[in-house]
Image: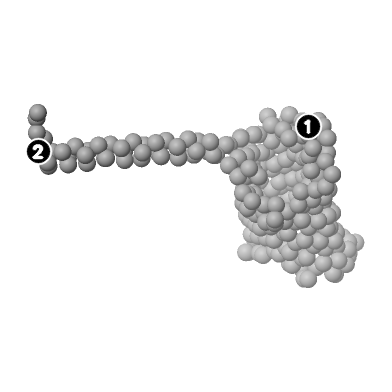
Amino acid sequence: MVRVHPWRQNLFIKMKNLKFRNLVLIICILLISLKGVSQSKQLQSVNQIWMGYFNQSRLSNRWGTWTDLHVRTKQALVDNFSQSIVRLGLTYYANDVTKLTAGIAFVSIYPADSHKLITQPELRPWQQVQWHTKYGKKKMMQWFRLEERFRRKILNDSTLADGNDFNFRLRYNFWYDLPLTKKGIVPKGVSFVVNDEVQVNFGKQIILNYFDQNRFFAGLKYQVNEHSNVQFGYMNLFQQLAAGNKYRNIHAIRLFYFQNLDFRKKTLQTKG
């Protein structure tokens, strides 16, 4: 019978225990990795066209109206429509550069993956504070907007359910206008425009996507006349969906038409 020296026996036991611990560690790493794969981020990238019309009309020294209309395509730029919005509001002018607006928006979310044969309606009351700042010939506009979103529930691909999903959404938007002509922002002048808006969700039904989306836009503005302009350029929208690990990255061509009318005088003026 071969006798094993005690220190060799202890070494053998330690190596055996080490191998066991390593095996357990490897199994744990594999399980964590598999879990990570199952919960990995899923990114959907699409191309769209966004078209919009904006009107801010000042009726008196203190009161005015807000209207904006939108239509957006689905994937591949011109493949059907994804959404339309009609937004109305009543504006209180604290002064010439600061405005408070409250209103309501009617949103139609056209057939999508979770409701392939029906349009999902959304009712969206909203409140906003907006202000303008001038830096020489350059201009900046900012706003904070609070929305209350009531989205009809979906029963299946072809049927709406009773009741609504609800959450709040807070939006911060800034828009910077850099004229490319020496005279500044004048009729028939061109400006370079940068715009960014970040949106966050909150409310009892928000669990995984407190961050909603960020919209970045860069393009050109053509000042049609004293009260109207057209903006055209590229927008990137990065959005976190309700599942938490699903994201949407939208590359959009954006075409917006803006009117700022002042009915206090016979001659229409640009305000902000």
Determine the residue positioned at 83% across, 55% down: 104
Residue 208 seen in the figure: yes
Return the mark for residue 5. 2
Q: Tag 1's secondary structure?
A: loop
Quarter of the figure with the N terminus: top left
**Front-lying residue, 102 or 117:** 117
SS under mark 2: loop
Of the pair 30 and 46, the residue shown nearer to us: 30
Residue displayed at 73% across by 30% down? 78
Q: Find the residue positioned furthest to the front.
A: 1
Which image quarter is the C terminus in?
bottom right
Q: Amino acid at mark 2?
A: His
Mark 1 and mark 2 lie on one chain; the one further toward the N terminus is 2
Q: Nearer the viewer, residue 53 or 188?
A: 53
What residue is shown with label 1? 157
The location of residue 159, given as percent across then percent down, is 83, 35
Residue, far right: 266
**Type of amino acid under label 1:** Asp
- Please provide percent x and percent y for residue 197: 65, 53
Task: Locate residue 163, reporting x and y percent.
Answer: 83, 47
Expressed as whole percent of the image width and height from the top left, the position of residue 120 reads 80, 40
Image height of 67 relative to 1, above or below: below
Query: Can see residue 81?
Result: no
* In-image side of 26 versus 126 (left or right): left
